[in-house]
Amino acid sequence: MDSVVSIDGSVRVEKLAELLGSRAEIDALDFKATCDLTKAKGKVEFVKDCAAMANLPRGGYLVIGAHDTGRPALDQPEISGNFDSARLQQLFDSYVSGTAQIISARHELEGREVVLVYVRPPTDHLPVVMKKDGAYTEQSGTQKTAFYEGQILTRFSSGNVKLDHRHWKRVLSNYETDLRKKVEKDSQELLKVVLDEIRQLATTGSGGSVPPALSVHLDDDSFYLAAVDLASSGVGGVERIRTIVRTLIAVGLVAGGTGDEDADGTVEDDRAQAFDRLCLLGLAGVDADSPELFGLVVEAYLEIHQRQFSLHEGRILGEVGEAAALRIVALLVRVFLLGSYITRRRKWQFLPWLVNRKITLSGGYEYSSWIRHALVTVSRAEVLKADGDGKGGSILAVARAHGRDTPSLCRDILAPVEVEASSGDPLLNSLCQFDLWWCMIAALHADHDKFGMEFYPNFAVFFGHRTEPAVDIIATDSAARAAAFPGSPRSDVASALKTVVEAARRESLNQGFHTEIKLSVSAAGFINGEDDSQA
């Protein structure tokens, strides 16, 4: 089973930490123990790797100087040559025809240089083609050719291959998506005109206001605004939304997504849109201050999650297969985006609604939060890293990538989310902060004997400054604590915060990166039980 890793274009140290920690085996990620760009063989092999990556829908990463175990390749010769982005681009362009871009960054790990290279797919969404042979001479004098003029390369089964019929759909997927978006834009504009005409006629005839029409066929912005209007109108409006929610649940539960049963990707695309629409309804519930609508969305996500498993008297039996695990990852992405929105909007009262839903297994074991159960499930399936020894990428990075690609789910962030995660990145920062909040809620509702098993601090591999604002709010804002942790004594919250922060510090060190949270004076005092009348 392929692991899920965020292919987002960042080449910063946080991305390197994620990729090294993933130990993933996917087409879009390749580890190279060493590389010598001073030799002809090293040059053409590097170009071959990049050309194959360029023909993937999101491009891909090369991690040079490390093994696929996530450790630096100390047993191999050090990498040699000029790995600056401009030089690599020049080398690539000398062999390849196309508009792909090469971006690189040098890092140091355990005293060893590691280079992270991102290959961005062509801007025109057409495949890159080799424009001359990749010939070189072995030390023995034997002539070798890594690729030939006119070849189109891609990645398949974690290796470089020549393009054949089965690869065309994936190679042209970005081009196909562009065409689909153009058609959808035209149809949405026509639908808006028709709905506006119908509403105006109805208003004229009745002499009063008409509730907004809510349809799954609306564009994201119109869908969200109609949901806000309905939720703000009261319980009757939420009841009208309930029918849409049942439709979205049904779409989310349709089987498919792997193999021949979804050869054209239609089922997977429809499911992704259903999950996004549920998330939009959740945003609408937050902005309309409607716990009824928000609760409806959470119950929908929870139902979809539980029905990925075999159930007996409401209890979950066994594990899940590949397709179900990937559906749970997709669901988690939207849940984390919804949580990050709550965090940015500071609507703390919605956090318990989202997090505090228990899951009971057939043997009687109980998870205090369904989010933890979902993360454990995908970690055991080795598609996402949600435990110290798991495989796959970080849910926070995967959620950020989806949020960047789907701006309607981050509608309060006015500027486009950049490829590179800067220190002030509002989306990644709020994802890290929500991660702390849900860990806290899960810890506070856990049985004492499994206190440390009820959460996993995904934020641990990201710089501590991203999460620190949430720590300070918990420590200094009594109203926020009361809303997010209703009924929990101050001492219990302080104890849980200490446990979560210490767990994150250990996980950060285990991954080989010193990114732990630095406590402010107020936060340290809160954890140590110092009295603060302002808290």
Image: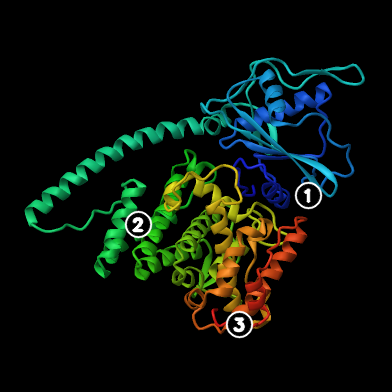
The part of the image, by quadrant, that contains residue 12 is top right
Secondary structure type for disc 3:
helix
Which badge, 2 or 1, comes first in the chain's sequence?
A: 1
Residue position marked by numbered label 2 in the rendering: 247
Foreground: 217 or 157? 217
Q: Residue at x 68, y 57 (%)?
A: 461
Disc 1 is placed on an element classified as loop
Q: Earlier in the sequence, mark 3 or mark 2?
A: 2
Q: How far across and down, in percent of the image, does residue 60 sit?
A: 64, 37
**Mark 3–mark 2 distance (CA, rounded to whole Å):** 41 Å
Q: Nearer the viewer, residue 331 or 224?
A: 224
SS class of the residue under badge 2? helix
Between 308 and 413, which is closer to the camera in this rendering?
Answer: 413
196 and 48: which is toward the camera: 196
Tell me the residue that label 3 is attached to.
492
Which residue corresponds to the image point at 67% horizontal and 26% vertical from the top-left? 89
**Disc 2 to disc 1, how far (Cα)?**
43 Å
Residue 134: x %, y % from top left: 74, 19
Which residue is tagged 1? 69
Earlier in the chain: of badge 1 and badge 3, it is: 1
Q: Is residue 182 left or right of residue 234?
A: right
The reply, left or right, for residue 136 in relation to residue 401 is: right
Position of 285 relative to 203 (above/below): below
What amino acid type is highlighted by mark number 1?
Thr
Q: Is disc 2 in contact with disc 1, using a CB cutoff of under 8 Å? A: no
